[in-house]
Image: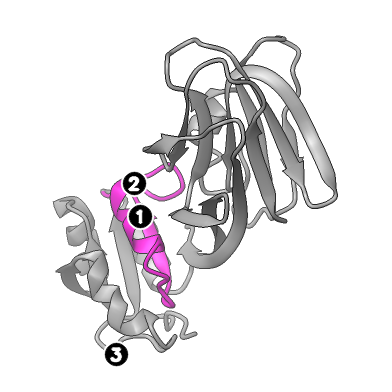
Amino acid sequence: MRAIPGESAVTVLVVGASSTAIEAIEAAGHTVRTGVPADLDAESGDGDPDPDFEAVVAIGESALLAVARRRPSIPVLPVDVPIGPDGADRRAIGAALAGEAPEHASPVLSVSVDGETIERAVMDVTLVTTEPARISEYAVHRTNGRVAAFRADGVVVATPAGSHGYAAAAGGPTFVPGTEAFSIVPIAPFHTQSSQWVVDTGPLSLSVLRDEGEVSLLVDDTDRGVVDPNQRVRLEVDDYVRTLRP
């Protein structure tokens, strides 16, 4: 995989809208090519970067999610999201594209239900009762056995990139870039002293233990349908996306 060359101008694919971010990139002496995540398909198929650009700037969460799911082999700079600089921060954007920002490999999860792949998750995966404030019972397993079982409104599993979002709002820890771990956080647990868990990035499975009402599966906050008590949601690292974190 090709790194961003230090102290030289590069051509940058910009996905998402932010005139200030584009101005910051151009002010740093780089060439901007605006586009869509599908523009990455040419370079992602065989692992060789498209010669037309050396980096991707993803502006906003929706752009970051779409870009990360395309399996880019070139670095991604997230902008206007909790894990990246503000679009108006010319210094940070310029430094990142000059090769001065640390590069971290962020895990992307394959999410499957009963063996059928549903989606790829960049930030988090959540099971939550479809009806607000309705409690159900959940279990979390790893390959070597059960991690926990608890009653709560739901449970969220967050990657390091997603630990600043829904999981943090539910009281979970936030991870520094490069952390090789997932957080498992109950949502509004029945027992207020309920634990949270930090585990390595090995495979996990989530399940609903009681048929007390519909439970929805959310992948990066997008509803992917109802999970029944006899079904198992499996989470497994499928790939990594290279992110620049100034």
Q: What residue would you read off at disc 2?
A: 61
Q: What amino acid type should be assigned to the residue bearing mark 1? A: Leu
Q: Nearer the viewer, residue 7 or 147?
A: 147
Span highlighted in magenta in the image: 62-87
Q: Is residue 70 above or below residue 217?
A: below
Q: Are marks 1 and 2 in contact (CB under 8 Å)?
A: yes
- State the image quarter where residue 36 is shown: bottom left
Name above or below for residue 93 compared with residue 230. below
Question: What element does badge 3 sit on?
Answer: loop
Give the side of residue 120 with respect to residue 35, left or right: right
Residue nearest the viewer, comparing 246 with 57: 57
Q: Amino acid at mark 3?
A: Pro
43 lies left or right of 170: left
Q: Position of residue 59 (x, y in %)?
A: 28, 53
Residue 215 magenta-drawn? no
Looking at the picture, the colour scheme in use is one colour
Report crowding for label 3: few under 14, some 14 to 19, many 20 or more residues within 10 A (C-alpha): few
Residue 69 is situated, as x and y percent measured from the top left of the image, at: 40, 62
